[in-house]
Image (cartoon, rainbow, N blue to C red):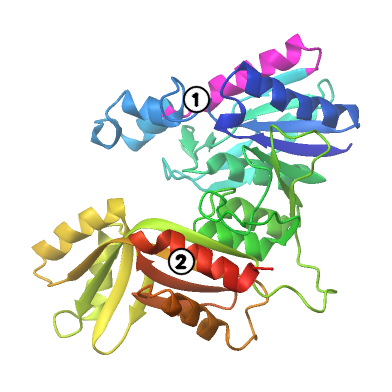
Amino acid sequence: MKIVVQKFGGTSVKDDESRHMAMKHVACAVKKGFKAAVVVSAIGRKGAPYATDSLLELVGNEKSKLSPREMDMLVSVGEVISAAVFCEMLKENGLKATAMTGPDAGFKTNNDYRNAKVIDVEKQNVMEAFKSFDVVVVAGFQGLSKSGHVTTLGRGGSDTSAALLGAALGAEYCDIFTDVSGMMTADPRLVEKAKFLKNVSYEEVANMAHEGAKVIHPRAVEVAQQAHLPLRIRSTWDDVDETGTVISDRNLAINHYRTVTGIAHQTGLTQFTVKSEDCSADRLFDLLAVNDLSVDFINISPEKYVFNLNREHSLVAKTVLSEAGIPVSIVEDCVKVSIVGAGIMGTPGITAKMVGALMREKIEILQTTDSYTTIWVLVHGKDLKRAVNVLHETFLGE
């Protein structure tokens, strides 16, 4: 039995027109002899009646009195509605289809409501359904806790659902359908000369996703890599023969692998600086951890500790540090810009080239660090467009 997993995001199932486009890709897979496990997100985005954000607004979002378990009970409804609606369309158009919730499809999670981790995917129900149906439509983003309650997997959870299901079913590949035709070397809304990437390695796209590229959730890439499951980023609106960007193991046979694959960015950061004379490092970071504040982009020196938080967490951190009597210097509206590439490791001069390009444009660098595949810089938000364009031209220009 040949199986393919196809995941359709909120914009791909937002209305009848979008769902008809999605259905064409499902029908094509069936026509080619595949059994299709179709994972769907909630219908539409914020403002649409059954979108996750819209459901949260019904109970006041973070001000809600509902427990995390009860919140999961509410927001999981969006994907269930989407699965039933899409399944109805498939049936009306002659496809043999059935719909399942995440728990129906065998997703078992821990009890960490609102951000559950999948412990196992029991594939029996889906495989049994394939004996009678060509398509199984599965509600993404959800599973069943150890306590027997519905859970949700956090933002981007439907991507993770699709990758996990593909790995469990031994799928030949997993298609992530969205509103773009694949991965680009940078955000085309900021960089007019951004280029299409036909092939990219798991490591590269995971790093791009971690650093702000929103085409796919990094956890989904990590799952696919562990299972050696090829991923394809495709547009729901493209022709059924357009395969988009293929994500797979890096081809080690290529002697001259590209140094830099793409430029990513993450907005809405706040930079915090605490002098070491005012607070010890262990006290500072223990305090942040106790308050569930996930710090990013950390530089520690004998004189000071510098770190960043997103907009939501920075509001909490200001209060926590103030109440603890810890003086702090703050720079608002920062942006992390990254160059990502499997070829960065072992290639001398990349950081110098990056810093030089930004300095020539008189872009102030607030912070910098690197890893074996990524180099990050922190700049002011006002410099974002200039920074990503000069780095794209420097490393990915003609």
Vertical position of residue 215 compared to residue 97: above or below: below
Callout 2 crowding tier (Cα within 10 Å): few <14, some 14–19, many ≥20: many
Vertical position of residue 64 compared to residue 317: above or below: above
Residue at horizontal 51%, vertical 85%?
A: 352
Element marked by disc 1? helix
Near-viewer residue (219 or 28) = 28
Q: Which mark is residue 387?
A: 2
Which contiguous range is marked in magenta?
75-96
207 left or right, relative to 298: right
Residue 164, percent across and down? 66, 46
Q: Which mark is residue 307?
A: none
Residue at horizontal 82%, vertical 38%?
A: 3
Q: Tell me, yes or no, whether the highlighted magenta stretch contains residue 95.
A: yes
Element marked by disc 2? helix
Query: In whole angstroms, how far apart are the C-alphas of marks 2 and 1?
Result: 38 Å
Dot placed on the residue nearer the N-terminal end, 2 or 1: 1
Vertical position of residue 101 compared to residue 199: above or below: above
268 left or right, relative to 156: left
The three-letter code of the residue at mark 2 reads Ala
Q: Which mark is residue 78?
A: 1
Q: Is residue 16 visible?
A: yes
Near-viewer residue (353 or 123) = 353
Residue 17, percent across and down? 64, 19
Q: Is residue 170 visible?
A: no
